[in-house]
Amino acid sequence: MSRNRNLFTALRLEKVVTFIVLALIVLVAAFNIAGMLIMMALRKTKEIGILRAMGASRKNVMRIFTGVGLMIGVIGTGLGAAFGVVVCFLLNRYQFVHLPGDVYFIKNLPVKMESPDFILTCTIALAISFLATLYPAIRAARLEPVEAIRYE
């Protein structure tokens, strides 16, 4: 490490940049979750109105939408983390990504899987997924039963 200090500094910087890019990808996915839940609330306006008319509180409607959004977030995060572990394992075992010798001092892409990185990434992904569910859930909970059922 002392002989190749510049290389390891560059790799550390690439790790930070990779984390930022992954966070932005998760943010885009969160907007997709929010958009899907908003569309679901629009399509299910009649059903939400019936639920509210039958006595479901705003909190219950909010829980339903938050639960659906979190379920999507948990499934997506779990599949993404599993895919990441498999790709890292394959990269570590078979070393099929070769680096140009004139730029780097090593031949293959080094992979080191660290639990804190996976945990941090999954936690942030779930937090963003939860935040993405709040607006559609609040919007669905604010529907008045009479207005929701009136034109159906």
Image: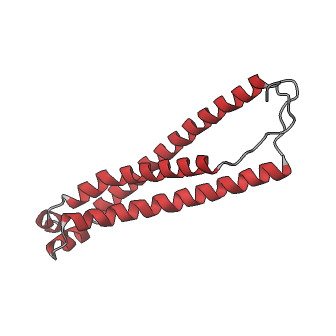
The spot of residue 106 in percent (x, y) is 85, 33
> How many marks are shown on the rendered structure?
0
Q: Closer to the camera, 69 or 95? A: 95
Toward the front, the furthest residue is 2
Examine the rendering and report whether any part of residue 45 can be seen. Answer: no
Q: How is the image coloured?
A: secondary structure
Name the image quarter holding the C terminus: bottom left
Toward the bottom, the furthest residue is 54
In this picture, residue 123 sits left or right of residue 61 = right
The spot of residue 19 in percent (x, y) is 58, 39
In this picture, residue 122 sits left or right of residue 53 = right
The spot of residue 47 in percent (x, y) is 25, 71
Name the image quarter holding the N terminus: top right
The image quarter containing residue 14 is top right
Q: Closer to the camera, 12 or 1? A: 1
The spot of residue 113 in percent (x, y) is 69, 49
Q: Which residue appears at 18% of the width and 58% of the height?
A: 142
In this picture, residue 90 sits left or right of residue 121 = right
Q: Which residue appears at 29% of the width and 57% of the height?
A: 137
Q: Compared to 51, does 133 lie above or below?
A: above
Q: Which residue appears at 34% of the width and 61% of the height?
A: 66
Examine the rendering and report whether any part of residue 12 can be seen. Answer: yes
The image quarter containing residue 99 is top right
Q: Compared to 135, does 48 lie above or below?
A: below
In this picture, residue 92 sits left or right of residue 66 = right
Q: Closer to the camera, 114 or 55? A: 114
